[in-house]
Amino acid sequence: MDDVGTAVPNLSALAGNLSPVLGRYFERSWSHGAGHRLYDTAGRGYLDFANGIAVTVLGHAHPRVSAAIHAQVDRLIGPTGAIGYSEPVVRLARMVADTLPAPIDTVFFVNSGSEAIESAIKLARRVTGRPAIIAFEGGFHGRTLGAASVTTSSGNYRMGYEPLLPSVYFTPFPRVYADFGGDETEATRVCLQHLRRLTSATVPAASVAAILIEPVQGEGGYHPAPAPFLRALRDFCDEHAILLVADEVQSGYARTGSMWALEQARVVPDAVCMAKAMANGLPLAALATRRELQERWGKGAHGSTYGGNPVACAAGIAVLETIRDEGLVENTAARGEELSRSLRSIAAEDERIGDVRGPGLMVGVEMVADARTRKPDGALAQAVMARAADLGLLVLTCGAEHQVIRWLPPLDVSASEIAEGVELFGEALRAV
Ligand SMILES: Cc1ncc(COP(=O)(O)O)c(C=O)c1O
């Protein structure tokens, strides 16, 4: 236990003016962060493998990011982009474009993942002149009305908000473990068949503006889409002049062992939505496409007062420079291998773990009540998460029944921290 506490009391007792609508993983009160540790108000340090849900991906108080923020705060906080250009915004757009596959070269900055999705939906409809959007069952794309309209990871995100956006259609996501007994080929075949059926019987492909997919379904349970499925989706979109929109809000930015998850399938989408990791905790998100699409979108067709704030962009530059200079794409791949291997060896001895899956440092551990039927056990996963936190490790859950324990270690995590996290996880498992 680290003795770095402050005199801050238990904040939950003082939180009566905060809305009760926000769900929380923990009723703990946080004081500060340093490196890969988050400290509670009693001064206890936790190994933070949650990163505020994939946001503080370089850990807390990162010297390079903090220095960039301080310098920019003193220089220029924020004329909105509509007033003109400022240096960090222009530079970051160039740097983000450089991480993306050609011909994607044009970035529209916003503040959150949901806004990036809203932007993609608006662009797709305006540019194609088509109304329909196809999204995947179990997907999560955000909480604003447009983003909630394409979200089905939980009924609670939609209930009571109808009518949501019209002309949104859903098709099954290839959840290889949960629905296809681990058979990727069958998952790919069946899900493509569903998509073709949808576009022949329900909505003509010629009316579809965009297909929106998370290459690794996140909130829905950490399901990686098989590469052949993603490639077939690209072909399908090409055949019907549909825009393929990748939601890389959670899977992007080196998380999966490549800068973008779709790279691993060798698929170039038409649009990429990104957020979370971009500024290591400051609000920053973006939609990126090839220039021609945003030219056709039209001047003034979309806008944002805060999107591309210079301070957030200065932090964003420091994040990308750190990823580049410290070889963090390679680190995520290597540490991810170690994490998955260690978790698989725990799973081999514990039949309550049905599956360990996910690329790089986006790893899900599915807890099951019965290994044969693969019946999810959300209560168990939540008990393990709570116990792990008691022991000083922060991991989260996801999945419709919160049955998947998700691991999101920082991108610059070390091998010894991975070993420490796995050790604490093993201890938590033994205790529940
Ligand atoms: C894949 C994905 N898309 C979109 C969002 C929405 O992002 P935000 O909460 O920043 O609006 C999230 C958030 O978890 C996400 O995981």
Image (cartoon, rainbow, N blue to C red):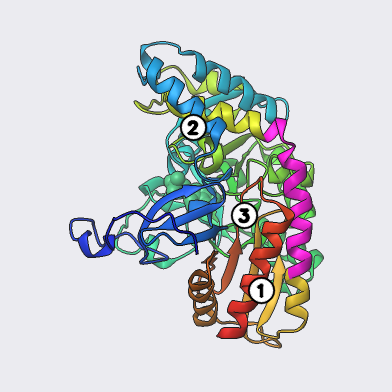
Q: Is mark 2 within 8 Å of ligand 1?
A: no
Residue 356 vs 289, above or below: the answer is below
Q: Position of residue 89 (x, y in %)?
A: 50, 20
Amino acid at the residue labelled 3: Pro
Can you say which quadrant of the picture contains the C terminus?
bottom right
Residue at the disc numbered 1: 178
Amino acid at the residue labelled 1: Ala
Say which residue appears at 79% left-offset and 42% top-offset.
266
Q: Do the residues bearing badges 2 and 1 touch, measured as CB atoms within 8 Å?
A: no
Say which residue appears at 44% left-offset and 16% top-offset.
299
Residue count near mark 1 (Cα–Cα under 10 Å), binned few <14, some 14–19, many ≥20: some
CA–CA distance in space, label 2 to label 1: 42 Å
Residue at the disc numbered 3: 409
Q: Of helix, strand and loop, which one carries label 1?
A: helix
Q: Nearer the viewer, mark 3 or mark 2?
A: 2
Residue at the disc numbered 2: 66
| Residue 302 is at least partly visible in this image | yes
Q: Position of residue 195 (x, y in %)?
A: 65, 57
CA–CA distance in space, label 1 to label 3: 24 Å
Say which residue appears at 41% left-offset and 28% top-offset.
307
Q: The magenta stretch spans which residues?
A: 323-342
